Image (tube, grey):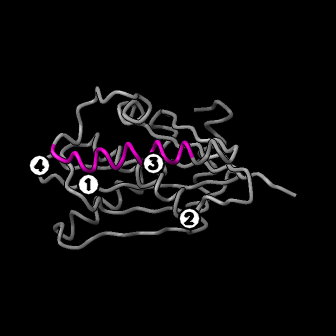
Amino acid sequence: METQKTYEIFTDASFDDVVKVGTYAIVIMQENKIVRIIAKKCNVQLENSTECEVFAIFQAINLIQGSLLNKNITQKFWLRTDCVVARDFFIEDENKIKIFENNLTLLNTIKQTYKRIKKVLSKKDCSFRLRWIPRESNKVAHKHAYSAFQKLKTTNNKKDIEVEINKWYNKLMLCKILRIYRKGIV
């Protein structure tokens, strides 16, 4: 019997315009439970916070391709970002948003990866959506991106920061936040 899985994937980024260094976080949820939280330093040179937000989404797409995609089940992947420009960057066909002008290779890689994942998922009768959400709904991803950024600043950018967090209290806090938001209390 074929089953179906739905993943909500929240992304966020933190960036320092002065030193041009950023971090990103990816929070993967399934059935209102956190499956995985990843917070890392961006491993490429970026020019602004929008590029950092796009890079976070790109890394989430890579994660879908690399470890979440399963051939035997129908899956839904709902990416969430609190950056409207990053969302628009992916959904527009023309490159009207002027980012990655200093790194056209990365620009093309990101665009091609997005198109490829959409094509692969459409053939499998799977669902893939990228949607903007308000910052209040993205608190957990924001918290982890900013936390990784603070750790990076304290190490003076010399050390690559990589944090994977799967603690029960983080899961509990996100579930509480999401329940409150979904009930319309916030």
Query: Disc 4 and disc 3: Cα gap in Å?
Result: 23 Å
Looking at the image, which is closer to me, 95 or 136? 95
**What amino acid type should be assigned to the residue bearing mark 2?**
Ser
Residue 185 x %, y %: 63, 32
Q: Which residue is mark 1?
A: 22
Q: Which residue is mark 2?
A: 67
Q: Which residue is mark 3?
A: 11
Q: Residue at x 38, y 50 (%)?
A: 56
Residue 96 x %, y %: 28, 26
Q: Quadrant of residue 100?
A: top left
Left or right: 8, with 3 as reference point: left
Q: Residue at x 38, y 42 (%)?
A: 111
**What amino acid type should be assigned to the residue bearing mark 3?**
Thr
Query: Disc 4 and disc 1: Cα gap in Å?
Result: 11 Å
The quarter of the picture where the N terminus appears is bottom right
* Count of labels in the image: 4
- Of circles 2 and 4, the one toward us is 2
Left or right: 66, with 71 as reference point: left
Left or right: 143, with 70 as reference point: left
Query: Disc 2 and disc 4: Cα gap in Å?
Result: 34 Å
Judging from the image, what secondary structure is the residue with disc 3 in? strand
Q: Which residue is mark 4?
A: 18
**What amino acid type should be assigned to the residue bearing mark 1?**
Gly
Image position of 146 with respect to 160: above or below: above
User: Mark 3, residues whose alpha carbon is within 10 Å: few (<14), some, or many (≥20)?
Assistant: many
Lower sequence index among marks 3 and 2: 3
Magenta residue span = 102-119
Query: Disc 3 and disc 2: Cα gap in Å?
Result: 17 Å
- Of circles 4 and 3, the one toward us is 3
Residue 153 x %, y %: 21, 63
Q: Residue at x 64, y 41 (%)?
A: 127
Lower sequence index among marks 2 and 1: 1
